[in-house]
Amino acid sequence: MNNGVRVPVADKREAILRAATHVFARNGYFNSKVADIAREAGVADGTVYLYFKSKEEILHSIFDRSMDEAIAEGRKQLESVVDPRERLRKIAHLHLERMGADRDLAVVFQVELRGSMKFMEEFSAARGFAEYLSLIRETFAEGQRAGLFRKNLNAKLVSKILFGALDEMATNWILSKRRYRLAPMADEVMDIFLSGVSA
Amino acid sequence: MNNGVRVPVADKREAILRAATHVFARNGYFNSKVADIAREAGVADGTVYLYFKSKEEILHSIFDRSMDEAIAEGRKQLESVVDPRERLRKIAHLHLERMGADRDLAVVFQVELRGSMKFMEEFSAARGFAEYLSLIRETFAEGQRAGLFRKNLNAKLVSKILFGALDEMATNWILSKRRYRLAPMADEVMDIFLSGVSA
Amino acid sequence: MNNGVRVPVADKREAILRAATHVFARNGYFNSKVADIAREAGVADGTVYLYFKSKEEILHSIFDRSMDEAIAEGRKQLESVVDPRERLRKIAHLHLERMGADRDLAVVFQVELRGSMKFMEEFSAARGFAEYLSLIRETFAEGQRAGLFRKNLNAKLVSKILFGALDEMATNWILSKRRYRLAPMADEVMDIFLSGVSA
Amino acid sequence: MNNGVRVPVADKREAILRAATHVFARNGYFNSKVADIAREAGVADGTVYLYFKSKEEILHSIFDRSMDEAIAEGRKQLESVVDPRERLRKIAHLHLERMGADRDLAVVFQVELRGSMKFMEEFSAARGFAEYLSLIRETFAEGQRAGLFRKNLNAKLVSKILFGALDEMATNWILSKRRYRLAPMADEVMDIFLSGVSA
DNA sequence: CATGAATGAGATTTCATTCAT
DNA sequence: CATGAATGAAATCTCATTCAT
């Protein structure tokens, strides 16, 4: 698997990211110590700095990697879907499936990303977020052109409403003591949403 | 010093809360120093501890006071409104009016409250938040009983959708470079929402 | 001990500088820990940072303060001396008296100042040092104009020779196991020096 | 890898010493990282430890090797010179020629050796230095016995003055922005020195 | 009540050195 | 011999909190 290229223990970088996600989810970014992450990853404190140049970069890497994965996966899954209603439904599903698949990651996203967006302006995860909103908006606009959705609605606003609803599902899910499946909420949200916007 | 006039204690507590809101909004809770708050409030570092027993308590006080005010104000304004649709519309307005009235406070709420909800067990702002969701839910259920809203919708879910949409409006508003008025978004959201849930 | 009473150190900044001089002289700048300085000064670690913004600034402050004192004292003492030979003799005396008066300070100067001069661009002690060389050079040039010293000698070079000789006396003194008085070496150096440069 | 040719060990040791001299000259001993030296020498970090048992030993080796070379070269060059005045002149020339031949080495000597002399007591370079001073002193004493130099001068003191003057030339040369040749300064120093001590 | 100098525990980060390959 | 990933001890600096005045 090295194909002649020395891939220095991609294992360890991975382990650190996973450990950091867990630790951040448990304590919050600011209350988490690099030493905790190192211990959880099974490496020495210093090793963390062979893979990331600061604690902050670890957080960024978590966001970036997840965003990249989500975007790639999303693109692939949406390729074959043409009906704007189905596309939106797919988007909603993907959103909540992904969040529901890794609770720690979801916590980090829902709890820490917001803070980060405020303070790390030129931060790539924020750009990923903007891209995501655009995708919803354009899909919706397409539906409007196709006569599926009411033409008098502001596409940008509508996309925020949909995102806000999904985001709230995720937030409630991570805050809830009860353990329920998150993905199915997508359908419920979409039913209401589509009724609200249909022509 | 005081020109013989006794400066009421409330003044200083107030000044500290206001200063803290501003400082937290600018830097985030963890990056804010108590010394910054004290300087901005025009008091000595130690004075902060005469009014609050810790930095964390300042944050909680900001939440609690705002929540209490919002709830009191909400109760009063809703007293005379009976139509569930109008009540929901009023709630949305109050929500965004309050957020839009104090940008710093809005930032603190949107950015820091969520983090706090995950890590601080059962503090009163979280209870206020739950109360708020209940209010929406019950108003909606009332509308269902009155035949205004579709009976097959899950009231709890619907209330989260509405809250999520409003919350997203607020978040977008604080993150936006553009300066627009937040409160009017309430109507736009409600139009879509009501179309979506009406019987 | 303190008999339970907190004995405030009179001038803390002063105490820290003195302690730092001692610690630096014993261990060298890079091997000295701020904690050592704090302990020796009888203050907490953090207190050091109320008076100096970094360990490096402590070193600079030691240099700067000593330089300023030396220059002020030198100016005063030289005011009344007109004969260039006597002026140079006075300069040599002041140089070695000052070094000989505080062994720790002498060590810091002889050992750390040179390193600092190479790596820290244009800090004030380096300027003080340049000023000092100028003073010697101009005094010597005056002596040349007065016919006391050989006119064919390069004043700048000569001033460096004199400084180098005095500097070497100081270095030998701090490195020596034996305890002898440094100041008297000034006369011995000056006798040879003046023989070498007299017309 | 080696093109079948065995790379002599001396090569690598040599490369490391040269690299270290350069790195130390640029950053100072304490600010230099072993990794920097390794990179500059074109070897792996660990390889450094096959040739030297610590970073400190590298510094010592630089001193020792230079001292040994200087002493050997000095002995050879002085063999045929009998006149004490000429011997001293030769010594001065050799001193400044050697320093002037390798600026990095000169920086390390002038800047780091002093610190080392204070903190590493039984350090062989210090012994080399003492030997060097003895050589000057005895040559001078010989000149006194030969009636060339004033008998009332303290040979030890005189030797320090000469050393101090030469040392100062070297220090000024490395600190100077200007690029001039160092060796010629030897004659200028010796002219003044010999005038000062001649009978 | 108010002050602000002082405290000191604690966290991030660096880097000389080791050792399995 | 050579490598360089991994180690982990150590040090600077920060800042919430206290308390003598």
Image (tube, coloured by chain):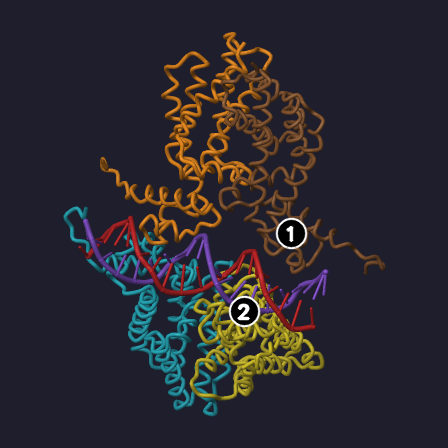
Chain colours: A orange, B brown, C yellow, D cyan, E purple, F red
Is B55 in front, or is B146?
B146
Query: Disc 2 sits on a residue from what chain?
Result: C
Mark carried by residue D163: none
Could you tell me the amino acid type at mark 2? Ala
- Secondary structure, mark 2, is loop
Is D117 in front, or is D145?
D117
Left or right: where D43 falls relative to B69:
left
Image coordinates for residue A22, horizontal then vertical, percent: 39, 43
* Residue occupying the far left of the picture: D4
CA gap between label 1 and label 2 equals 25 Å
Residue D22 visible to the viewer: no
* Residue occupying the far top of the picture: A147
* Residue occupying the far front of the picture: B145
Residue at the image point whose x is 59% and y is 34% from the top: B132
Residue A172 visible to the viewer: yes
Q: Residues within 10 Å of mark 2 (few under 14, many from 20)?
A: some
Image coordinates for residue B186, horizontal then vertical, percent: 64, 24
Q: Which residue is mark 2?
A: C44
Same subunit, labels 1 and 2: the answer reads no
Q: Residues within 10 Å of mark 1 (few under 14, many from 20)?
A: many
Residue at the image point whose x is 49% and y is 18% from the top: B152
Quadrant of res B70:
top right
Could you tell me the amino acid type at mark 1? Ile
Is C154 in front, or is C89?
C89
Quadrant of res C65:
bottom right
Left or right: where C95 falls relative to A7:
right
Quadrant where the C terminus of chain A is found in the figure? top right
Q: Which residue is mark 1?
A: B37
